[in-house]
Every structure is written in C-alpha cells, then in structure tokens.
Image (cartoon, rainbow, N blue to C red):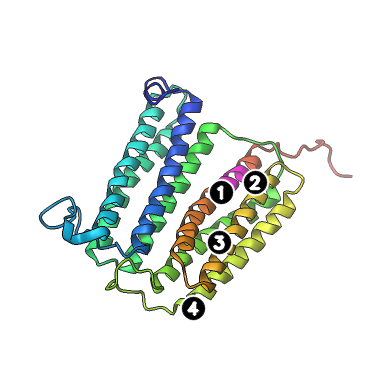
C-alpha cells in the first residue's frame, strides 16, 4: 500500500507501519542531534528559530558547522511529516480507539515542543541540563510511539506472569534512570557541542562509574526477569532486552576506555533509543499478559 492509499483508506497494517515510522524517525533525530554535538556544531546556527539574526539559512562564514546544525533542523521537518501522517492515518482508521487517537496527538504535538527545547538549548549556549532534557524528551517520544505500535497491534497474551509484573516495573524504572544518568555523564564530558559550551561541573569519571552501577542493576533485574519467564512466550522478549542491554553496555565500556571516539558515542546514542524501545515493549507485553491472564478458579467449597 502506497503512502497516499495508507492515508486515504488506512487499515491496521498501514497504521502500524506509520507508528513504526515514528519510532524510527525519532531515533534518527536522536542520532543526527548527537552528531551535531559530537562534531562541535551545536552553535553552528548561533540563534533560533533563525540560523542567524538575519537569515533562516546558514551563510558561508559559519562553515561546515552551520551546514550540520542547519541540516539537523531540516530533518525535524521530515519527522513532522511522519508524525502528521501518523495522526491522519489514525484519525481516518475506522477501528481506531480514543486512546490511540490521543497517543497519536501527543506524538504529533511532542515534536514541535521538542524543537522548542532544542531552540532553548541553543539560546542558552548548550546548557548541559537543557541538552539532557532535549534527549530525554526524544526518548519519551520513542517510548510513546512504541506504546502506539503495541496498541495498534492489539497484542495480548494469556500467560500467567503476575509474579513478574513487579520485576518488570522495577526494571523499567531503572532503565530510565540509566538513560538519564547517561545524559548527565555526557553533560560532564568532552563532547559539549561547542568549544565554549558550559559543562555541568560534575566529575565525568565519577559519574561514569555511577552510570555503570545503574547498568549493573538493570542487567541483574533483566536477568531475573528472563529466569522467571523462561517457560513463557514473554521470556523471548526479556532475552532480547537482555541482549540489547549487553550490547549497549559493551559499547559504553569500549567508548570509555578508548577516549570516547565519535563513532562509538553515536552508536551508543542509537543504542539508548533501541533500549528504551525494547524495554517499553517488554513492559507492555508483560503487563498485558498479566491483565489478560484468567483469574484463579476456586471450587466454591468451604475449607474443612
């Protein structure tokens, strides 16, 4: 089904594709935003919403940094097109629920809001705390897009996994702590986005160890989850999450011991988005399985 047809007469499969496109587009914008910072192009366009005080586009004096920063801003319009397409598809899909329509609206409105936060980061000369918020909001949009994918699919399971519900919720909370601490580490490190950009004043080596400790907790919780679900279909999802965590952790350790090469830091950013996406799906799958599991039956006889 072509793009026009998927908007004119959407069906479940086409709506799901639009939701996945939102996941991918939000992940790509995380990558390109990271490349802006990693190449020192964070202030390539020194103001916002214009690139300079006189023009929306960069001039030759801004060099490659201006081109890179402006290119990232232009990609935001691609993301806008994707989320608007998603919203239109959901609105025109006859089987759409109110929850699905609300999620699509949140995703669509979240993108311009995210752009405003990006503009504030430029206007504050890349304040590391604002830049951290900028990344976290992108991760929230990834998570919300995954939630919409899950709702459109209508995934449900009859597996009785009530004992795992508390574990998966704990795991998911720790997952977000891991991602946020990663942004704090970045805010203390060398890749500031510009030579004159401020840092958060924390010791990057200490914060790296704090971040690593949270990763150990996350991996331990996920490993326990895998053990609890080993005989259930959701166990495969938990194993996938564990694999993503181990891959992301490996990249993190290698980049730390190799002085943060740009390619590995960029891969680590994409890995963070993949981690949020996978973790969100695992959470939804297990909670859904718990809610759809049949209640234990009683014989109706009184105990002797």
Pick the front one: 67 or 271: 67
Pick the front one: 189 or 14: 189
Pick the front one: 112 or 199: 199
State the CA–CA distance, disc 3 to disc 4. Answer: 21 Å
State the CA–CA distance, disc 4 to disc 1. Answer: 28 Å
Question: 67 left or right of 101?
Answer: left
Q: From the image, state whether disc 4 or disc 2 is nearer to you.
A: 4
Badge 3 vs badge 4, beta-carbon distance below 8 Å: no
Badge 1 vs badge 2, beta-carbon distance below 8 Å: yes
Could you tell which of marks 4 and 1 lies nearer the N-terminus? 4
Say the numbered circle drawn on residue 174: 3
Which class describes the residues within 10 Å of circle 3: few (<14), some (14-19), or many (20+)?
Answer: some
Could you tell which of marks 3 and 4 lies nearer the N-terminus? 3
Pick the front one: 257 or 108: 257
Task: Determine whether the residue tagged by mark 3 lies in a helix, strand or loop.
Answer: helix
Badge 2 vs badge 3, beta-carbon distance below 8 Å: no
Q: Classify 162 as above or below 37.
A: above
Task: Based on the picture, tell me whether residue 107 belongs to the magenta stretch.
Answer: no
Residue 197 position, x and y percent, is 29, 71
Q: Which residues are magenta?
A: 278-287
Residue 30 position, x and y percent, is 40, 53
Magenta: predominant secondary structure element?
Answer: helix
Q: From the image, tell me which residue sits under label 1.
A: 278
């Amino acid at each position: 089904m072509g793009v026009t047809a998927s908007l004119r007469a959407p069906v479940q499969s086409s709506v799901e594709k639009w939701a996945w496109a939102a996941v991918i587009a939000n992940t790509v914008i995380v990558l390109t935003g990271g490349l802006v910072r990693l190449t020192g192009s964070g202030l390539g366009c020194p103001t916002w919403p214009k690139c300079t005080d006189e023009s929306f586009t960069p001039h030759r004096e801004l060099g490659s940094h201006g081109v890179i920063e402006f290119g990232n801003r232009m990609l935001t319009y691609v993301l806008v097109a994707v989320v608007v397409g998603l919203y239109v598809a959901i609105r025109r899909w006859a089987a759409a629920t109110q929850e699905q329509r609300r999620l699509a609206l949140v995703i669509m409105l979240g993108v311009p809001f995210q752009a405003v936060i990006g503009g504030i980061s430029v206007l504050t000369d890349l304040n590391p705390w604002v830049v951290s918020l900028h990344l976290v909001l992108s991760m929230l949009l990834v998570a919300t897009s995954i939630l919409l994918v899950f709702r459109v699919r209508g995934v449900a399971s009859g597996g009785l996994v009530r004992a795992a519900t508390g574990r998966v919720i704990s795991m998911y909370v720790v997952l977000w702590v891991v991602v946020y601490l990663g942004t704090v580490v970045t805010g203390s490190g060398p890749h500031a986005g510009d030579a004159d950009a401020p840092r958060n004043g924390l010791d990057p080596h200490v914060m790296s160890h704090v971040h690593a400790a949270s990763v150990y907790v996350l991996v331990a919780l996920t490993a326990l989850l895998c053990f609890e679900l080993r005989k259930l279909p959701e166990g495969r999802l938990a194993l996938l999450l564990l694999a993503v965590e181990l891959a992301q952790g490996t990249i993190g350790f290698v980049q730390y011991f190799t002085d943060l090469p740009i390619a590995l830091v960029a891969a680590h950013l994409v890995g963070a988005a993949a981690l949020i996406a996978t973790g969100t799906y695992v959470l939804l799958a297990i909670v859904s399985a718990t809610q759809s599991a049949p209640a234990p039956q009683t014989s109706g006889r009184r105990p002797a």
